[in-house]
Amino acid sequence: MLHTLTYTVPEDGLTIETILQDKWKLGKKLIHDLRMQKAVSDTSGELLQWKLPNKKGDVLVFTWEGESSNYLPSDQIPLYVAYEDEYLIIASKPRGVATHPNEVGQNHTFMNTVTHYLSSKEQAYGEHVHRIDEGTKGLVVVAKNPIVKGMLDRMLENKTIIRTYEAIVEGQVKNQHGTIRAAIGNDRHHPTRKRVSPSGQQAITHYEVVGRHPEYTKVHAILETGRTHQIRVHLAHLGHPIVGDDLYGAKKTATKTYELHAFKVQFMHPITGEMIIVEDKR
């Protein structure tokens, strides 16, 4: 498919090579594809030289053939779009829905719904930058083209995309705030459960108490690492499993759901440089 992206140079002296390699930190394959396709021009369509410096305010137009997404479009799940521009979408995944398909032909996931939404706008590319557990509701960032996807991937690795979760946990959390540093690995006694394990992957969660009730505590948690079930495992390890999360020791509830909401995401927009702060207020 044909991808397009426009970018306004933010300062004097930047070359296309510098922007792609140093500023955007794109992968070598994508940079090679852009170079081979002579993908960069000005607004009049004139091709630009990669090693020549550009001036602040110059507009670069990227046009290239690249991959499209292969999710099956489906409108069976409601989609709440909290933020959108020409580069990315931030939308809310409902509780009980997988972020993306795990098998061929699966079409009841968040990404199938996003694909349907984009196809209605004649757009064929959308890829999630991160994911959240099926039982967790909340915000997911989706890139609209491979350049933005590459940039957001690097930002996630560098921990400059901040995701805040709200959890309601059993009991009274003693400290008003704290940091849980406990490696997470597989539980050999259960096919999907994770556990704190010295031989597991490093995992760090920061938390703050934001509300108290005689039987439960409301906390905000920020991930420094992104391990599977991390917040659920860490809060249970603290002695306060998330309400309804019986996989990690909470009391069983009639709804069979647990109270975890990825309600806020913030980061510096990779293209515009604007600080993006989005909250899921539903």
Image (cartoon, rainbow, N blue to C red):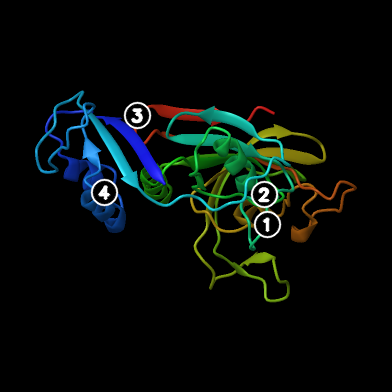
Mark 1 vs mark 3, foreground winner is: 1
Q: Is residue 142 visible?
A: yes
Q: Which quadrant of the structure image shows residue 194? A: bottom right
Instruction: Pick whichever, 276 or 90, lies toward us.
Output: 90
Q: Is residue 46 left or right of residue 267?
A: left
Give residue 160's position: percent from left, percent from top.
41, 42
Residue identified by numbered label 4: 34
Query: Is 211 displayed left or right of 9 in the figure?
Result: right
Label 4 CA crowd tier, 10 Å (few <14, some 14–19, many 20+): some
Choose the circle earlier in sequence order: 4 or 2. Answer: 4
Which residue in the protein does label 2 denote? 109
- Residue 43: x and y in percent read 24, 27
Residue corresponding to mark 3? 272
Residues at circles 1 and 2 in contact by the CB criterion of under 8 Å:
yes
Q: Earlier in the sequence, mark 4 or mark 1?
A: 4
Tell me the CA gap for discs 2 and 3. Answer: 30 Å
